Image: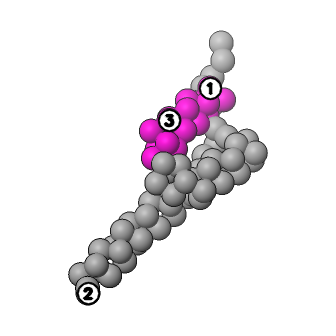
Amino acid sequence: MGSHIVIIVGVTVLLLALWIYTATTIFSSRGLTSGGKTGWAVFSFVLPLIGPLAWLVYGKAAADRSAADWTEPRL
């Protein structure tokens, strides 16, 4: 019975760490509006495994591309 608690605590800590990392990268992203940041944060909080993974796979890359569009010099 004790090993089940260790597994549950371990998974909980990993999910919490993933969500904190995701929230940090969402709110520090320059390529998102405040509404976009709020939407991604809510999505990540409501779906604690799928949300952060979706952000890391799709959202972060899209936000980085969007930020690059604003910072590259225009000719």
Magenta: main secondary structure: helix
Q: Label 2: which residue?
A: 2
Please state which of residues 74 and 53 is positioned toward the viewer in this rendering.
53
Figure colour scheme: one colour
The crowding category of the residue bearing disc 2, from other C-alpha atoms within 10 Å (few below 14, some 14 to 19, many at least 20), is few
Q: Amino acid at mark 2?
A: Gly
Q: Label 3: which residue?
A: 58
Q: Is residue 27 magenta?
A: no
Residue sitting at x 26%, y 85%: 1
**Of label 3 and label 2, which has the lower sequence position?**
2
Q: Percent position (x, y) of residue 66?
A: 61, 30
Label 2 element class: helix
Q: Which one is in front in this view, the residue at disc 3 or the one at disc 1?
A: 3
Label 1 element class: helix
Q: Label 1: which residue?
A: 69
Tell me if label 3 and label 1 are in contact, CB under 8 Å. no
Residue sitting at x 62%, y 26%: 69
Residue sitting at x 28%, y 78%: 4
Q: Is residue 16 above or below residue 2?
A: above
First to last magenta residue range: 53-70
Q: Amino acid at mark 3?
A: Tyr
Residue sitting at x 26%, y 87%: 2
Tell me if label 3 and label 2 are in contact, CB under 8 Å. no
Q: Amino acid at mark 1?
A: Asp
Cα distance in 3D space between marks 3 and 2 = 38 Å
Q: Is residue 38 above or below residue 31?
A: below
